[in-house]
Image: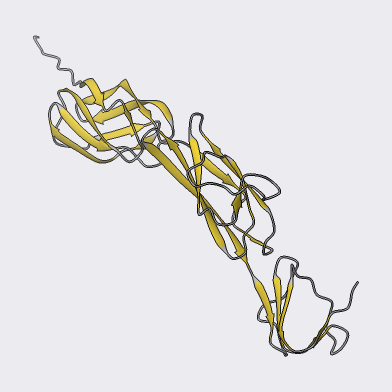
Amino acid sequence: ANGRVSFKYISVSSVSPSSVCAGSVITITGTNFATSGTTTVTINGIACTNVIVNNNTTITATVGTSTAFGTHTVVIDNPNGTNNGKTITIGTPTLSISPTDTTVCKNSIQPIVATASAGSAVTWSPTTNLYTDAACTIPYIAGTNASNVWAKPSATTTYTATATNGACSKTAEVSFEIETAAWNGTSWNTPPDANKSLLFAGDYNSNTDNRTLIEGCDCTVTSGAVTIASD
């Protein structure tokens, strides 16, 4: 018996731009794209969003914001076939920051380390109480590339690192919380500890009234008589 075999296929001639930032729109040009049914586009295992088959020769898609830095294969899965013959370079750098958010003593020196992908420049904001040396004597200048900085926050502050690679960038943050344990003459608003400033607004004597020894970063007395026994 005579018969006919038909093959479904798609071809891809280009993916443009060839180098983009995560979150950017790309255009895939080829032939025989089915305009109905479901079409997906993935890059390094991360699905693109807003995939639109405009016609049988053009697909547009938005690169997933979590797509990793580097050159990766573009996989198009269309009802007429799958194609993985083209690559694209994602320029958005990787960036991590250490330490994580933490409570610290007021005016204590806190090292901050940013780790970014090769070729990226790292800048910081705000510049308040931010330095480029461990002794905190050389202020950080806005826009300067520095992977390692030191903070000496006098108030709760969130520092933002921005890694830039060409037109692409990524940010990460760390917050240093300055917490105060306040004594009103009767009770604490929060239990004192070694990472909190102590504020006294009333009489306090650690030797009487069954009050235990306390720890704190520093001590401010706004009113009252304060006596704290040494160890």
Residue 167 as seen in the image, left or right of residue 228: left
* x and y percentages locating residue 72 in the rendered image: 39, 26
* Residue depicted at x 57% and y 47%: 140
Q: Is residue 94 left or right of residue 107?
A: left
Residue at image position (8%, 9%) is 2
* Residue reaching furthest to the top: 1
Q: Residue pushed farthest left?
A: 2
Q: Vertical placement of 13 versus 20: above or below?
A: above
> Residue at 49% of width from left, 47% of height from top?
142
Residue at the (69%, 87%) spot, across then down: 184
Q: Position of residue 161 (x, y in %)?
A: 50, 47
Left or right side of 170 for 173: right
Whole-percent x, y for residue 196 in the image: 70, 69
Screen quadrant of the N terminus: top left
- The quadrant where residue 178 appears: bottom right
Image location (x, y in percent) of residue 60: 21, 35
Location of the C terminus by quadrant is bottom right
Image quadrant in which you'd find residue 65:
top left
Specify whether 27 is left or right of 85.
left
Q: Is residue 195 above or below residue 167?
A: below
Picture layout, residue 16 above or below residue 116: above
Q: Nearer the viewer, residue 136 or 125?
A: 136
